[in-house]
Amino acid sequence: MDRKKKFTNFNIYIPIVLLASIIFSSFVNNSFFYLLLLVLYLYKNFYSSFLTIGKVEKFLLYLTPVVFYFKKFYDTFHRKDLLFWDNQYLFMFFRCNRGLTDNYIFLEKIKYNCVEDIGFGIFPSLISINIDPWLASIFIFFISTLTFIYLIINTNSNYLYQSMLFILSPAFRFLVFSLNPDIIFLIGFLYLIILKKLEINIFGYIFLTIAIQTKIFPIGLLLGFIFYTFVYKEKNNLIKASFFLVSNLGLIIYDLTNKTISEIDVFTNTFLGIPYVYAPIYSFGVLADFKTYFDVQLNPNLGNFRFLQVLLLIFLIFLAFISKRLSRNNYQKISFFEKKIFISFTPMICFISLFGNYGYKLPFYFILTFIVFSHSDQYIRLLLILFILFNPLFHMLNFEYAHQLFQPTSLNSLSFAISRISFYLTNYVYLYFFIKIIKSKK
């Protein structure tokens, strides 16, 4: 009896101590912060639960992102780093379309030279407005912040730990500080899920069209929604979605053909006219990893080929283990609405995974992670935790936003291995769930 009571008290106080330590680690460095965060989630996953036990624990959980982001924003302003750079680039592009060239990137006042293409689709090239990029960025940042605060406050306590993991993740932090337009699309997708229950009306299709003609990857969501309507025989939705898919494909082909003919492509890395990025600590995706293999030394002792062989062997071992754990799940317990989300979003996630993308696109994966987290055992949850905290890699290695090169030390190689193996295993888990959900349809 006494031992059991003592263990219960242990469960109460350990999260409080860890959360207090994590808040303190915000003032130390990135690696310390994320390693302690990993310890907290390992403890909750294996020795406790993801429920908040008391008011103190809940208060500290809410306080952690407040202190963390306040400290990181303070450091950014103190160093005069670039901030909200992607949103600034976009609004400078709008000004350039109007013929205005007096553009500077803040916080550091760097002159921006107008370009004909910023790697987006046809929609941004149609906008010509004179709005201060820095003020526009601040406005969009506050609107986005208030939206996510509202969502967190209204999150069911059963999902509070998962929500905080996403908010504190390197990927979400990257998205907030760059303020890439993806943050608007993420909010739009959450709106379609939470408020519209993924019932897409004409305004939803218009939003998706704008998203597709800006960043192209949301076409995967439209394709996934079409697949869902086909599987569940929703004829009216199938016809509407198919019409918008064909229309968007036509615009994409026209845009890519026009860029190829006019030879204005200024990007080093493109695939079928679509720009992609690669860097072992900043990006993810099949194409990014392919180029990284040839261009970057990944291990101090092994050559890249032997290092890849080791990674492949480890991957196959964990793949067999993960497959065994996944086969034990009861996929009939997944709700109809969760199935609708999974079928609709999986093609978009697969599309993103094929290219090279900066890490701020990873928050789109979290939409599916919520569902997998709720219907998996502790080992699958462990995989997702590692995936979220080690992708992209640069924050775990205590880098900020300067373009540091990957240093092939033993510790960095180990971190890289965790990052890439967890990424590909997570994609496998998504596809496994996707197939099982299709098969479990009644």
Image (tube, grey):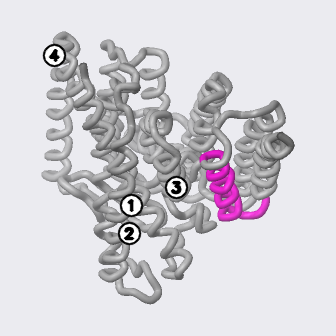
Give the residue at x 20% y 38%: 252
Q: Where does the C terminus fall, quadrant-wise?
A: top left
Q: Is residue 41 magenta?
A: yes
The reply to whether dot 2 and dot 1 touch (C-beta < 8 Å) is: yes
Q: Which residues are magenta?
A: 27-45
**Could you give the CA–CA distance between mark 4 and mark 2, rounded to whole angstroms?**
45 Å
Residue behind mark 3: 386
Side of 234 where 137 appears, left or right: right
Side of 428 where 227 appears, left or right: left
The reply to whether dot 3 and dot 2 touch (C-beta < 8 Å) is: no
Q: Is residue 178 magenta?
A: no
**Could you give the CA–CA distance between mark 1 and mark 3, rounded to whole angstroms?**
13 Å
Give the residue at x 40% y 48%: 325
**Could you give the CA–CA distance between mark 1 and mark 4, rounded to whole angstroms?**
42 Å
Give the residue at x 49% y 30%: 187
Q: Nearer the viewer, residue 58 or 24?
A: 58
Residue 289 pos. (x, y %): 33, 65
Residue behind mark 4: 239
| Mark 1 burial class by Cα count in 10 Å: few <14, some 14-19, many 20+ | some
Looking at numbered disc 3 in the image, what kind of residue is underneath it? Leu
Sequence-first tag of 3 and 2: 2
Looking at numbered disc 2 in the image, what kind of residue is underneath it? Ile
**Could you give the CA–CA distance between mark 4 and mark 3, rounded to whole angstroms?**
40 Å
Residue 265 pos. (x, y %): 25, 57
* Secondary structure category for the residue under label 1: helix
Q: Mark 3 or mark 2: which is in front?
A: 2
Q: Nearer the viewer, residue 408 or 89?
A: 408
The circle drawn on residue 318 is: 1
Looking at numbered disc 4 in the image, what kind of residue is underneath it? Ile
| Mark 2 burial class by Cα count in 10 Å: few <14, some 14-19, many 20+ | few
Q: Main secondary structure of the magenta part?
A: helix
